[in-house]
Image (tube, rainbow, N blue to C red):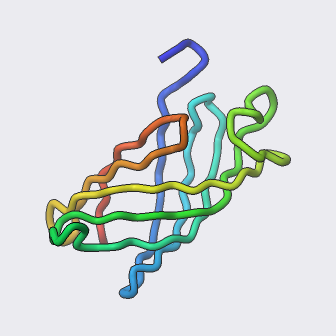
């Protein structure tokens, strides 16, 4: 990691309906140390490739938080707001626990632990 970037800390909440539709939001410190947020809607497809534990999720929404000299680090940024589409693949460890990897364009990949309540 270069000196300009920092580790990202994120906390998110998501609701997935029985039809697979998902709505959620996250607060995070972006890799430039700025407080940021992501609000989104999407869909989760379970039993990917015939495997009960494998799923795919695709979400789209608005990110806020890349401002000042970092405004061009995300595309189509207007006043700190930028559209985002985030695909993810996950593996259910139990009916309530999962691990997930999400692709953030050319910027990176996130790895997360998810818990259903």
Q: Position of residue 91 (x, y in %)?
A: 22, 58
Is residue 48 positioned above or below 98 on the image?
Answer: below
* Residue 100: percent from left, percent from top: 31, 53
The residue lying at 26 percent from left, 53 percent from top is 99
> Relative to 94, does residue 112 appear above or below in the rendering?
above
Q: Position of residue 106 (x, y in %)?
A: 54, 36
Q: Is residue 116 above or below residue 62?
A: below
Q: Quadrant of residue 41?
A: bottom right
Image quarter where the C terminus lies is bottom left
Which residue does the image show at 22% across and 73% down from the upper left?
47
Give the residue at x 41% y 83%. 17
Q: Residue at x 70, y 50 (%)?
A: 64
Answer left or right for 40 relative to 101: right
Residue 24, given in percent of the width and then of the height, sits at: 52, 67
Left or right of 49, for residue 22: right
- 45 and 12: which is toward the camera: 45
């Amino acid at each position: 990691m270069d000196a300009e970037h920092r580790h990202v800390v994120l906390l998110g909440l998501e609701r997935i309906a029985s039809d697979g539709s998902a709505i959620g939001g996250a607060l995070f410190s972006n890799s430039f140390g700025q407080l940021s947020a992501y609000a989104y809607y999407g869909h989760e497809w379970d039993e990917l490739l015939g495997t009960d534990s494998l799923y795919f999720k695709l979400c789209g929404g608005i990110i806020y938080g890349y401002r000042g000299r970092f405004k061009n680090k995300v595309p189509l940024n207007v006043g700190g707001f930028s559209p985002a589409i985030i695909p993810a693949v996950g593996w259910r460890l139990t009916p309530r626990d999962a691990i997930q990897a999400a692709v953030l364009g050319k910027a990176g990949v996130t790895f997360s632990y998810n818990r259903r309540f």
